[in-house]
Amino acid sequence: MTKEKKILLEACGISKQFGGVEVLSDINLDLCAGEIHALLGENGAGKSTFAKILAGVHRPTRGQMKLTGESVDVSSPIVAQKLGIALIHQEPISFPDLSVAENIVMGRQVGGLFSRVPWTEIIEEARHYLDMLDVSIDVTRPMRGLSIANQQMVEIARSLASDSKLIIMDEPTAPLTPREVDTLFKIARRLREEGRTIIFISHRLEEVRMLCDRVTIFRDGAHISTDTIDVISDDEIIKLMIGRTLKKYMRKHKAKVGEIAMEVSSLSLPSKFENISFCLRRGEIIGLGGLVGAGRTDVARALFGVSPAATGQITIGGVKAIIDKPADAIELGLAFVPEDRAGHGIFSTLSVEHNLTATIPDKIAPKGIISRKLEKSISSKAVDDLSVRLASLRQPIVELSGGNQQKTILARWLLTEPEILILDEPTRGIDIGVKAEFYDMIGELAAMGRAILLISSELPELLSLCDRILVMSEGRVTAELPRESATQENIMQAAVPKSILAA
């Protein structure tokens, strides 16, 4: 960081408590104009809370902020927007029944108080910013139904349209394709050249090293260090983040592959996927790889009865299965951890305890009346088994970090004692330490005889964990690769649509 850089924002003694639990403690941090500043730490370290304080979503318990040397009270997101601060949320936030264009200009006054809404200008502006991101979306369509990746691109477009001085990107690349990530990085570098400041929160160290000028590390709500990216190694970053060195996380439990748990034959759903066939054995982890939009999530949703296939057959334990709704799947011993944690994974208005026990009413109410003692006992064991970090079982689940929410979702499904687990991007937005824990858990579950279908966009994850990898492209399985011969290169070759390869 050169001395010529001017300080844009100063955080002075920022602290935050939730329910008497301090999640941030006396954070002091300077952000310079024209820099990309990485903010790293484990899930629950306080990164997202700090970002939300900067953006006016939360008020600090104590401390103050200065913008270009002047004290400011960022009391709401609207105030933050007026001050030139924009936040791209980890979980895309939108108004689902409004159009893409309306979501992009949301929060800004368009036209006078009694003037007509300039729809033509709004649509043109929305198209302009999506074109910058090289994203093809009909801006007049409602947000509802867009993929997670496209929702994230709309949120990025909204921040660009706001012409902000400070843009906070909280895990922006998690749902994006490599091409979309590359485009985003080009735009970020251009914004830096224009003198704007970017906070980049990520768990992908390779991205941090490619993009960022400085890196700040949080641990347990405290500011541990700030360094220029070129003077600190990845091993040092990991040690500062988690307080220990991290051994190479691989699948540690060699599972014995047994009989067929589930067989899928010629499964099809028009415009989503076609002729999907495979068998999954007990103790086996099958990876489902491919680019975003290849149809992987659609297959998972069909298997679990969320959006059933139109044709084809599913056999469970040698018996033909009719799965028209999730209840059918649960009855047959299936569990599904969805990609969209915020939208489909958690019950956002409920406590951690009630999220955990939502799938086991018979266990907590054996005589038709909920036993509070039994519910608490089961929930306590579940969070202990998966090392969920929380203040209380009664704590609202939305107050947990993304990684601890994900652990809670997995714990909920394990309480149903499933034979088959479908995991859709289970480590998206999860820090390195928790990711290692997840890898251990997945390996242990396979060693116990569970059959696991793992959808992941992280190629090292597929290569480390899976016995076989099925690659999808444009709704079809284009390759089946055994563990021994699978490489990042042959996965990507099978994943890229033929139309792109021919171009």
Image: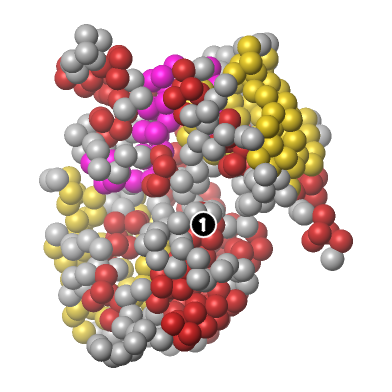
Residue position for label 1: 146
Is residue 427 or residue 118 the one in the foreground? 118
Tag 1 secondary structure: loop
Q: Quadrant of residue 32?
A: bottom left
Can residue 224 be seen from the camera position used here? no
Can residue 311 be seen from the camera position used here? yes
Is residue 414 found inside the magenta-colored segment of the image? Answer: yes
Percent coordinates x, y for residue 304 in the rendering? 53, 30
Percent coordinates x, y for residue 35 in the rendering? 46, 77
Left/right of residue 377 with respect to residue 438 in the rendered view: left
Percent coordinates x, y for residue 115 in the rendering? 30, 90
Percent coordinates x, y for residue 15 in the rendering? 19, 59
Residue at screen point 14% across, 45% down: 19
Q: In which quarter of the image is residue 54?
A: bottom left
Q: Which colour scheme is used?
A: secondary structure
Q: Considering only vertical position in the picture, is 215 above or below 444?
A: below
Q: In which quarter of the image is residue 500?
A: bottom right
Residue at screen point 46% across, 61% down: 143
Amino acid type for the residue under numbered disc 1: Leu
Left/right of residue 263 with respect to residue 107 in the rendered view: right
Left/right of residue 273 with respect to residue 413 in the rendered view: right
Q: What stretch is highlighted in magenta?
A: 396-423
Dot 1 crowding, Cα within 10 Å, few <14, some 14–19, many 20+? some
- The total of numbered circles placed on residues is 1
Residue at screen point 18% across, 70% down: 75
Q: Considering only vertical position in the picture, is 265 above or below 208?
A: above
The residue furthest right is: 502
Left/right of residue 68 with respect to residue 253 in the rendered view: left
Is residue 31 found inside the magenta-colored segment of the image? Answer: no
Is residue 393 or residue 20 the one in the foreground? 393
Residue at screen point 51% across, 17% down: 332
